[in-house]
Image (cartoon, rainbow, N blue to C red):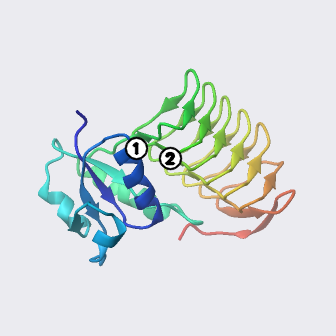
């Protein structure tokens, strides 16, 4: 049996993870989140453990963590939680929904999460703590950097390369061979036809650089 999991974060993505883990019959010890004392109504049947400091009550050998922080436009907090706990010796579960599709030679690093209906193509590589959300497509030969989030319904066409801490908004499309620099944000619904520098916001059809977007 897999080690029991503690979910970090009680927001929407945390709820999705809880439901996915339950569907996978993966034991859940509980959820941590600062100030969330009303958890019982949100996560029926699961224990609210307190804030993230409670994780230290468990040894690194007896549990796994699940990163329940999503990102609307900024992946920093999600990446920070992963980095802090990995530096303390904890490990993160890689969670793949049973309704996701991974084709041959897909590579997934620690803590990758692939939600229902997502498709990961041949020889794609997802680095640590990447989230590929519901119904998103990451095609053949793509590389997605650590802590990046490909939001629901986004399509990353073949041989694209995304840096670290990239957010690709819901329903966005990147045509084949696009490169996206670290910390860039692709707005929801955009169509990206040219490579995107680090740390900017790209939006529109076709996408244009709208402004610099510091990762804060």
Say above or below: 97 vs 10: above
Say above or below: 62 vs 105: below
Which residue is labeled 2 in the image? 130
The front one of 26 and 207 is 26
Q: Secondary structure at mark 1?
A: loop
Q: Which residue lies at the image location 37% right of the left edge and 66% below the top edge?
A: 10
Is 150 displayed left or right of 156 in the figure? Answer: left
The front one of 46 and 6 is 46
Which residue is labeled 1 in the image? 111
Q: Which residue lies at the image location 55% right of the left edge and 21% below the top edge?
A: 105
Q: Position of residue 60 (x, y in %)?
A: 18, 46
Tag 1 and tag 2, C-beta contact below 8 Å: yes
Q: Position of residue 94 (x, y in %)?
A: 39, 40
The front one of 119 and 174 is 119
Q: Position of residue 81 (x, y in %)?
A: 36, 59
Q: Position of residue 212 (x, y in %)?
A: 70, 69
Say above or below: 139 vs 16: above
State which quadrant residue 79 falls in.
bottom left
- State which quarter of the image contains the N terminus: top left
Q: Residue furthest top?
A: 104
Q: Which residue lies at the image location 23% right of the left edge and 45% below the top edge?
A: 4
């Amino acid at each position: 049996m897999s080690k029991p999991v503690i979910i970090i974060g009680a927001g929407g993505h945390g709820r999705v993870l809880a439901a996915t883990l339950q569907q996978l019959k993966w034991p859940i010890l509980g959820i941590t989140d600062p100030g969330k004392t009303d958890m019982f109504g949100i996560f029926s049947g699961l224990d609210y453990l307190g804030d993230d400091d409670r994780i230290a009550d468990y040894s690194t050998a007896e549990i796994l963590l699940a990163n329940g922080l999503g990102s609307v436009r900024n992946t920093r907090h999600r990446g920070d939680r992963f980095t802090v706990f990995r530096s303390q010796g904890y490990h993160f579960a890689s969670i793949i929904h049973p309704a996701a599709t991974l084709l041959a030679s897909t590579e997934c690093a620690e803590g990758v999460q692939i939600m229902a209906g997502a498709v990961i193509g041949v020889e794609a590589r997802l680095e640590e703590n990447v989230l590929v959300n519901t119904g998103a497509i990451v095609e053949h030969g793509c590389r997605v950097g650590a802590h990046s989030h490909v939001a629901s319904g986004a399509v990353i066409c073949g041989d694209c390369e995304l840096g670290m801490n990239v957010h690709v908004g819901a329903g966005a499309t990147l045509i084949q061979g696009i490169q996206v620099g670290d910390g860039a944000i692709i707005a929801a619904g955009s169509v990206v036809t040219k490579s995107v520098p680090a740390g900017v916001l790209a939006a529109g059809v076709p996408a244009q650089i709208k402004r610099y977007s510091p990762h804060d």
